[in-house]
Image (cartoon, grey):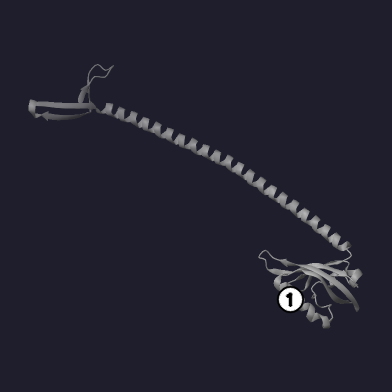
Amino acid sequence: YWPKAIPGQPSKTGYPKMSYIKYFEPFKWVIGAGEYADVIDELVNIEKAKLKSSRNNFFGVVTISTVSMLLILIVLSSLISRKVFQGIFNYERRLLDSSNKLKKSEKRLYDIASSSGDIIWEIDDFNNYVFVSGATQAILGVEPESLIGTSWFDNIPEENRSKIQEIIHSAKKSKQSLKDLEIIFISNGKKLFIQVNGIPVVDDSGDLIGYRGVYRDIS
């Protein structure tokens, strides 16, 4: 304890003091330094207050930065979602327009085929009818639906069938069109002379998947 003058007190009072003393041999001196403990405590408290203030400021900055980033992310997400939604909406609208145009085109072709004086047909790779339209009733005396699923050769007389099958097989092998091919067609016991024109149908890989064309009555 070392005496310390305190303003307002009549006499010096002993206070704890931290000291350090060192003997300096060359001059035979004793050198010392010290500071009262309450002063040291006050300085420590000041530094603690500064540290606490800095820490609070740091957390404040972090909080503000986090909130700002969240707001930015929300705004960006909203803008991106709006663009994505608009893109999907535009795509669906174009898809719907394309579908409507396709339906109109199909109806136009169907109407043309139905009003045509010829028969429009399509067969698959197994020579079975998958589509028939046009003047089927007027020429053949049957409804188009009655031919669906039947073979292209069923109505050709047996004595002519092998020859026509060879012609068709050869055309399919080289993917050639059928040009003014004349066949005999038996329908409801009636013998008809039919002129056949057709083109090969291929898939995306270029493989033959059938033929489509036109029957014309030349009887």
**Which residue is found at the position 80% from the left and 67% from the top?**
213
Residue 56 % position (x, y): 42, 34
Q: Identify whether 141 is placed above or below 21.
A: below
Tag count in the figure? 1
Q: How busy is the neighbourhood of tag 1: few (under 14 within 10 Å), some, or many (20 plus)?
A: few
Residue 38 % position (x, y): 27, 27
Q: Residue furthest bottom?
A: 159
**Which residue is found at the position 86% from the left and 76% from the top?**
185
Q: Identify whether 101 is placed above or below 203.
A: above
Q: Quadrant of the C terminus?
A: bottom right
Identify the image quadrant of residue 137: bottom right
Q: Identify whether 7 is placed above or below 146.
A: above
202 or 15, which is in the foreground? 202
Identify the image quadrant of residue 216: bottom right
Q: Amino acid at mark 1?
A: His
**Secondary structure type for disc 1:** helix
Residue 176 visible (yes or no) = yes
Q: Is residue 139 left or right of residue 106?
A: right
Residue 78 % position (x, y): 61, 42
2 or 148, which is in the foreground? 148
Name the residue that disc number 1 marks: 169
**Which residue is found at the position 72% from the left and 72% from the top?**
172
Q: Residue furthest front?
A: 180
**Which residue is found at the position 70% from the left and 71% from the top?**
174
Residue 188 visible (yes or no) = no
Identify the image quadrant of residue 17: top left
Q: Quadrant of the N terminus?
A: top left
90 or 173, which is in the foreground? 173
Residue 138 % position (x, y): 91, 69
